[in-house]
């Protein structure tokens, strides 16, 4: 089956096709690999040369009726997440030749379910960015308009889905890196609650904010992938012991009983008119369906971005200290002493944005400034958490735009870090509060660029946002 169509395939379609023997995982994987070869969006950094072998193995499992719904389904993995034997660069020169010596727990669960890793997707260096322009392997282009960014930092994963180079993908989200690119590329993405999915094997950016999450062509697919990824992992002390519910069977149950909230702070200045209209139009359709939506307030929202850009760099500066060229990664021949060695490796190995954040973080944590910046930001973090706790006692799901605008042009914000940071304004609070969020496409603007809706739920309430997301998807289909 050489002309196998890969356009926007969902897991259920693939699984049905595999079970009915319309195609094999081998044929499907070959079709994706063929498309990846012709990729003109720069979505992948490397391809898994064992993908076809893994697909053959999945076919054997399926033939023996041993495979579940994920068996034989191809997966693209953000290059910040480790898969044993595959290159893991984090889109940085400092790890340009690094081969992972173990597999991230989340990927391991999916591989054990029979998923086939197609390759590693491009991203902003160590996940720092909102446009994918910070990759040492070149920017990713938005498949909807190649003059525009796909969002970041999981831009390669989002573009791979939008260009049908993969039917499922993994991203990481520290301040919006799954939800914002999903929104820019018209695909679905979920940031799980902090602790829901093990972070083991994901290169740490800001450990108190990072989460690995699924990206796909439907909300149901997100639920299915999360089902396998979620759960306690003894290898990640911050992963939660909280029971993993049956996300799939929760879909479609009592959806109309969900109490919905519209946080007024998310509809303020800076929000593009077309995005606002799309979200408000959707809210009106939900009300027409008999759902109640009330206006709510998260008063500390205005401080979220500043808090994020203090806490995140502080953690970045400490986490990235490990890249010193001694044990792995970029190395030098200089024998002139340790300080010069570090200087040489880290100057050559890191890009400008990473350096900026390391320096900012070091400053924030330094004696004399720690109290004024880091400690103060931690206090505001508590207030933001309390905002969420209060609002989630009144409503089950918050509806907001995922991003203030649709995809912007390449180069449009790269000279001005502050404007770039502003594109995360609607996503960072969820990471600060540790709550869950998903983004799903609800339409396009006049330029034909996708508009994303963000659904936020309380910590460990993924079933609620998945349930509503799935309902909305069917409502607007
Ligand atoms: N765009 C945000 C940043 O630059 C978020 C990154 C992320 O979630 N990894 O920090």
Image (cartoon, rainbow, N blue to C red):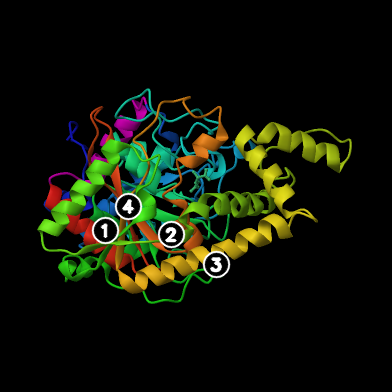
Q: Is residue 30 magenta?
A: yes
Could you say where residue 66 lies in the image, as x and y percent from the top left?
24, 64
Could you say where residue 95 lies in the image, as x and y percent from the top left?
61, 40
Disc assigned to residue 400: 4
Residue that appears at 52% across and 30% down: 137
Please identify the dominant SS of the magenta region. helix
Asked if the residue at label 2 sits under 8 Å from ligand 1, the reply is no
Given contact means CB atoms under 8 Å apart, are the residues at marks 4 and 2 in contact? no
Disc assigned to residue 106: 2
Mark closest to the chain's N terminus, 1 or 4: 1
Q: Nearer the viewer, mark 1 or mark 4?
A: 4
Mark closest to the chain's N terminus, 3 or 4: 3
Give the structural element (helix, strand or loop) at label 3. helix
Given contact means CB atoms under 8 Å apart, are the residues at marks 3 and 4 in contact? no
Magenta segment, which residues? 21-40
Rendered position, 95 above or below 412: below
Residue that appears at 30% across and 31% down: 35
Give the structural element (helix, strand or loop) at label 2. helix
Residue 2 sits in quarter: top left
Disc assigned to residue 61: 1
Residue labelled with disc 3: 382
Mark closest to the chain's N terminus, 2 or 1: 1
Task: Name the image quarter holding the N terminus.
Answer: top left
Image side of residue 451 versus residue 176, left or right: left
Residue that appears at 29% across and 68% down: 396
Between residues 206 and 217, which one lies in front from this camera angle?
A: 206
Marks 1 and 4 sit apart, C-alpha to C-alpha, by 42 Å
Give the structural element (helix, strand or loop) at label 1. helix
Marks 2 and 1 sit apart, C-alpha to C-alpha, by 21 Å
Q: Is residue 351 magenta?
A: no
């Amino acid at each position: 089956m050489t002309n196998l169509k890969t356009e926007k395939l969902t897991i259920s379609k693939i699984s049905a096709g595999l079970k009915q023997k319309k195609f094999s995982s081998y044929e499907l994987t070959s079709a994706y690999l063929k498309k990846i070869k012709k990729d003109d969006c720069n979505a992948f950094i490397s391809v898994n040369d064992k993908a076809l072998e893994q697909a053959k193995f999945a076919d054997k499992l399926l033939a023996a009726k041993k495979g579940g719904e994920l068996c034989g389904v191809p997966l693209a993995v953000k290059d910040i997440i480790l898969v044993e034997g595959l290159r893991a660069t984090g889109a940085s020169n400092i790890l340009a030749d690094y081969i992972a010596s173990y597999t991230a727990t989340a990927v391991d669960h999916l591989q054990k379910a029979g998923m086939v890793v197609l390759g590693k997707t491009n991203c902003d260096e160590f996940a720092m960015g909102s446009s994918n322009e910070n990759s040492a392997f070149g920017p990713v282009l938005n498949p909807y308009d190649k003059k525009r960014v796909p969002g970041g930092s999981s831009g390669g994963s989002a573009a791979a889905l939008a260009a049908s180079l993969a039917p499922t993908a993994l991203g990481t989200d520290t301040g919006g890196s799954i939800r914002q690119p999903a929104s820019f590329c018209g695909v679905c993405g979920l940031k799980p609650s902090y602790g829901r999915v093990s972070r083991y094997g994901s290169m740490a950016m800001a450990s108190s904010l990072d989460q690995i999450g699924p990206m796909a062509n439907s909300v149901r697919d997100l639920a299915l992938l999360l089902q396998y990824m979620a759960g306690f992992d003894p290898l990640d002390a911050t992963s939660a012991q909280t029971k993993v519910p049956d996300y799939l069977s929760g879909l479609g149950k009592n959806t109309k009983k969900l109490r919905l909230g519209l946080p007024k702070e998310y509809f303020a200045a800076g929000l593009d008119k077309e995005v606002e209209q799309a979200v408000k139009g959707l809210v009106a359709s939900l009300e027409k369906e008999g759902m109640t939506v009330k206006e709510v307030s998260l008063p500390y929202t205005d401080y979220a971005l500043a808090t994020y850009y203090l806490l995140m760099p502080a953690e970045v500066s400490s986490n990235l200290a490990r890249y010193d060229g001694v044990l792995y990664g970029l190395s030098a021949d200089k024998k002139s002493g340790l300080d010069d060695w570090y200087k040489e490796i880290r100057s050559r190995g890191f890009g400008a944005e990473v350096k900026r954040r390391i320096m900012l973080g070091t400053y924030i944590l330094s004696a004399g400034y720690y109290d004024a910046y880091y400690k103060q930001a931690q206090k505001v973090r508590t207030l933001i958490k309390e905002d969420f706790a209060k609002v989630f006692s009144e409503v089950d799901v918050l509806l907001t735009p995922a991003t203030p605008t649709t995809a912007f042009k390449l180069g449009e914000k790269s000279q001005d870090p502050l404007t770039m940071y502003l594109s995360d304004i609607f996503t960072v609070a969820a990471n600060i509060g540790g709550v869950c969020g998903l983004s799903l496409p609800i339409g396009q603007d006049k330029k034909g660029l996708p508009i994303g809706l963000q659904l936020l739920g309380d910590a460990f309430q993924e079933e609620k946002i998945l349930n509503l997301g799935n309902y909305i998807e069917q409502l607007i289909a």
